[in-house]
């Protein structure tokens, strides 16, 4: 198991190993701020994440790090063929380190992360990993290839990005909503893929049911923000338009019935309820599925 949860840090029992780790980590933290190559940045970030999990300390200016990282993405070609160890993708360490920075110092880091464009860039990279990028036509039917680029980002990396995104929505909801519904629909399209049959099957191939459940639940939580009482009509109308275009209601019903246990359906069922309240097409979809599927009957009548 290579999944790292920095909220539950491990303890180094061998003091000799820790003594060796500390000076190396200080050097790598410096390298993480100065190297101009994205693969090296990614490798440094992955080391720092493991070092944090082991209790190592180092100095890293969060605002400067985030701002410089956004510049590296803009200046670099991102089609790197890099095989990271332990089933990690190129973006995994970067996402995990950024998420840690946001949790430690949200006041300074979150604004920089959004304003410098790095948060948006990460979602662009995720959509590129899904191989469903249509820069010249927003209206073209999306065709998801069923083999995502796990070299660029792993299944756990997707989970970490969703956790980071949810945290940013809580802290800067209106700025994040603007990114969710903007004309290029990078984030919305990627979230839509999270609920697709093709991707959930890919998540479920080598992962525990925990990860699949978490990805679905986090995605639904993010989709719930446009329905907040604090949200403007513009955000809501645009969200409803996109939900209809991508047939979110049908995807929700399918993933909920297929992957979620009864104690985990509250959030997706809440989203289904919101969509059915506002959209006649959603109500028709539910009605048709109620007539044809016993599981939907059980789901919506609990």
Image (spheres, rainbow, N blue to C red):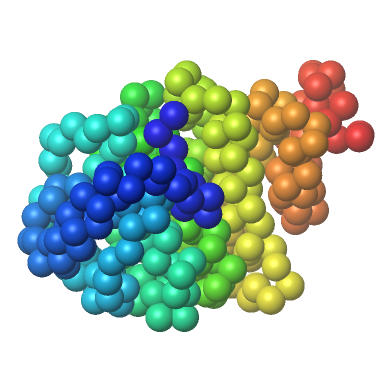
Pinpoint residue 45: horizontal percent, then vertical percent. Answer: 26, 54
Q: Residue at x 69, y 63 (%)?
A: 227
Q: Residue at x 33, y 64 (%)?
A: 57
Pinpoint residue 207: horizontal percent, then vertical percent. Answer: 49, 25
Pinpoint residue 112: horizontal percent, then vertical percent. Answer: 35, 77
Left or right placement of residue 159 versus residue 146 in this view: right
Left or right placement of residue 300 versus residue 171 in this view: right
Which quadrant of the figure contains the C terminus?
top right
Decide if residue 176 is in sight here.
yes
Q: Is residue 115 above or below residue 246?
A: below
Q: Is residue 53 above or below residue 100?
A: above
Please tell me which residue lies in front, 12 or 28.
12
Q: Residue at x 41, y 50 (%)?
A: 53
Q: Residue at x 53, y 50 (%)?
A: 8
Pinpoint residue 47: horizontal percent, then vertical percent. Answer: 26, 49
Residue 152, by quadrant, is top left
Please tell me which residue lies in front, 21 or 291.
21
């Amino acid at each position: 198991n290579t999944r790292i949860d920095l909220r539950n840090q491990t303890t180094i029992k061998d003091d000799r190993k820790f003594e060796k780790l500390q000076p190396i980590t200080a050097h790598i933290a410096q390298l993480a701020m100065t190297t101009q190559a994205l693969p090296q940045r990614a490798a440094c970030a992955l080391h720092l994440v493991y070092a944090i999990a082991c209790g190592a300390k180092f100095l890293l200016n969060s605002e400067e790090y985030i701002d410089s990282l956004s510049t590296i993405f803009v200046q670099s070609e991102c089609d790197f063929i890099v095989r990271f160890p332990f089933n990690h993708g190129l973006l995994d360490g970067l996402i995990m380190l950024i998420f840690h920075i946001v949790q430690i110092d949200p006041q300074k880091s979150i604004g920089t992360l959004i304003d410098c464009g790095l948060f948006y860039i990460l979602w662009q990279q995720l959509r590129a990993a899904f191989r469903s990028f249509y820069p010249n036509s927003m209206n073209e039917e999306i065709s998801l290839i069923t083999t995502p680029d796990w070299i660029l980002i792993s299944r756990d990396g997707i989970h970490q990005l969703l956790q980071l995104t949810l945290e940013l929505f809580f802290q800067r909801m209106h700025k994040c909503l603007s990114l969710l519904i903007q004309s290029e629909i990078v984030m919305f399209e990627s979230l839509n893929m999270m609920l697709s049959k093709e991707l959930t099957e890919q998540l479920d191939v080598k992962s525990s049911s925990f990860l699949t459940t978490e990805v679905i639940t986090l995605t639904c939580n993010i989709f719930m923000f446009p329905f907040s009482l604090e949200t403007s009509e513009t955000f809501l109308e645009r969200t409803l338009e996109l939900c209809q275009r991508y047939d979110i209601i049908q995807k929700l019903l399918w993933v909920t019935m297929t992957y979620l246990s009864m104690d985990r359906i509250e959030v997706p069922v809440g989203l289904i309820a919101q969509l059915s309240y506002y959209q006649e097409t959603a109500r028709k979809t539910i009605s048709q599925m109620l007539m044809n599927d016993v599981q939907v009957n059980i789901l919506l009548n609990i």
